Image (cartoon, rainbow, N blue to C red):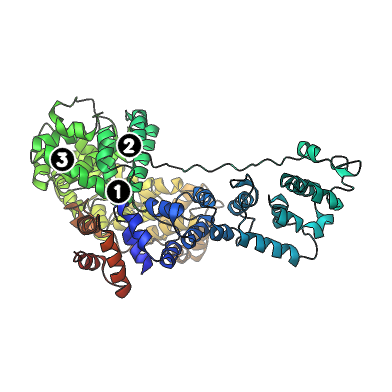
Amino acid sequence: MLLRFFRLLESARPADIPAVLAALPEADLAEAVTAMEGRLTRVARDHILARGPSSALAALARQAIRGRGEDPDWIIDRVLTRFDPEADEVFFTFSSADPRVHRARRAILRDRQGPDGHAVVAPGVRRRLLALTKSQSRLKRDDWWDEIADADDPKLVLALMSHVAWLTERQAARIIATLDAHGLRDVARRHRGLWEGRGSAFSRLGFPRFNNLSWVYTFGSDFTPVQESMEAVSVDQYRELVGEAASLKSPQAAHRLRVLAWAALRAGTMSPAEVLEHTRPAALAMSLAVSDGGGHLPGEQRAADDMRFCIAGYAAEWLADDPDRWGQAFSRMYTYKGTILELFAKPDSAVRYHFVSVEALPDGAREAANILLALAPADVAARALADPATWDETITAAAGLTPLCRALVDHVVADGTLQQRRELAANGATPDPVLARLMDESADPHLLLRIMGRATAVGREIIERAYALAPRDDQVMRWISGQDPAEALDALRHMAEDPAWVLSVLRVTIPRWRADAQRGRMAAYALLAELIGVEAVWALEVELAGSLEAMAPRVRESMAAGDAEPLIEAAREFSVQWPRNLPSWRDGIDLDHPLDRPLENLVRTHLDGRPDRWLHLAALLQATPDARYEDLIAEAARLP
């Protein structure tokens, strides 16, 4: 139940999350952190780190030690700043061989200081370590002992006195320095094993040389706090950073600004309206309306949907149902250097720069024009694309990118240029029905080659149709010769009605395969034997090998046996596994609503600003753990 609730909570408004977490039972919160394996929204993570109960903080520390969650090293440092006894003990339940654990334990025992300038060692940690010193009959070479000797805690270092003969000089020096720092110089003198017989660095006239030890041995802290990989900036900080990405000619700066905007949106330190007000160029801001894909961070989908919702509101206000204004904004999306709000306000007066190559754009910003078109009403988008004033270059770029919408697909299929159709054919998001329409509308061999290049990513009916329509010419031969054995043989099996042409293709293709592609080579020979006869295989292999002695062993076996069985046997070891259960977007339904996220829409409508409804939903989920999210939200929305 908790796992499902926290996954749904990723769709919550950031401002609502702290109130929901604060009202949950402590045990439930800790269990949820464990169930989520530390994969929390930034707001949830930061709430637990700042004011969460000890059990949840300890659970988060365990996940960070395992490298889970966002910025695990930074999380560990934040846990240490809480001085929480339960969380501190977690680090002593893992092996000190782990660098994260070793560093945290050193910080707890020595480097993390309290108001008195000394380390604050939790009672439970001290008891655990004292028990360890008593359980050993002799001091062993172990990181545990080095950590105890380094501890800024008199009780711990004095517990090693029964093992003093086994201490290294450095460990003994560290213990002496610790006792001296705590005003226990006389105690150090009494424990003669610490300094007696350890050389002039330790003793003078029979007493420890306290001041000299610090010159010989370094006792300073080597603890350096880890910085958060991407800080959630404020509006003022963000405004100052925008200048670094003022031009798409700086992809690195633009990418950094995009990541900063994501972090601020996920953390709730900036609203979508504030991001839109300050982000330039327009394409960079528009790209924030779509998350980065399947590996998105918790809360990223909600942040993207909030951006989409905000941009759609401004577009409806300023572009309205005017196809001219939509077309102008679409054409200038990649070249306009101002903000989205400035572009929407006066799209017709925006300076029309030369088109920017999509390849020159930073990652993420390349889909900006597609996103804008997907936000337009379908009929308005269709009229905007049909307008001669709309740039062909922008349409061409959009045809090869995502998201695809119905208006763009219909325009390219019916009225697009050859290059636009080729881009759409090669687009991995183009559904199979659209590929079928493209083949109906055009006999362009380049278009067919684009589809054939997606052989493992389209339905079998589509690829077989492309093979059937492709001309048996030199261009297709060159394409096949550039493929791996699996793709090349799949094509040839479907284009085998002209055996002589297949032979000519193999004569060019086989020499291009890697030397280790012998199974594919034998599969090709088995196909050739089936089409023409095994004699053709022998002749081709002699031609390619240069001599009988250099021929492949299986081909020589075939010649000795006088049949193709050795080739067929070898070919059985070479198989092509085609994918099954192709993605649902292949039926084309997402083309009508490519950006809609129904779950986020329901959460925004019924749960935003209502932590009480979130808690009611948690109770409903506990009672009916298998219920659909949509039904639970509808039930929670009844709460007045």
In space, the residues marked 3 and 1 are separated at their CA atoms by: 18 Å
Q: Amino acid at mark 2?
A: Val
Q: Which residue is mark 3?
A: 315
Q: Residue 524, located in which quarter of the rendered image?
A: bottom left
Q: Which residue is mark 1?
A: 303
Residue 175: % across, % down: 76, 49
Tell whether label 1 touches label 2 (CB within 8 Å): no
- Sooner in the amino-acid sequence: mark 3 or mark 2: 2
- Sooner in the amino-acid sequence: mark 2 or mark 1: 2
Q: Which mark is residue 235?
A: 2
Q: Where's the C terminus, which quadrant?
A: bottom left
In space, the residues marked 2 and 1 are separated at their CA atoms by: 16 Å
In space, the residues marked 3 and 2 are separated at their CA atoms by: 23 Å
- Sooner in the amino-acid sequence: mark 3 or mark 1: 1
Q: Where's the N terminus, which quadrant?
A: bottom left
Pointer 1: residues within 10 angstroms few (<14), some, or many (20+)?
many
- Specify whether residue 361 is in view: yes
Tag nearer the camera, 2 or 1: 2
The residue furthest right is 205
- Specify whether residue 422 is in view: no
| Residue 277 vertical position relative to residue 382 in the rendered view, above or below | above
Number of marks in the image? 3
Q: Amino acid at mark 3?
A: Ala
Query: In the shown orientation, is residue 87 left or right of residue 394?
Result: right
From the viewer's side, name the closer residue of 61 and 639.
Answer: 639
Residue located at (16% from left, 34% from top): 344
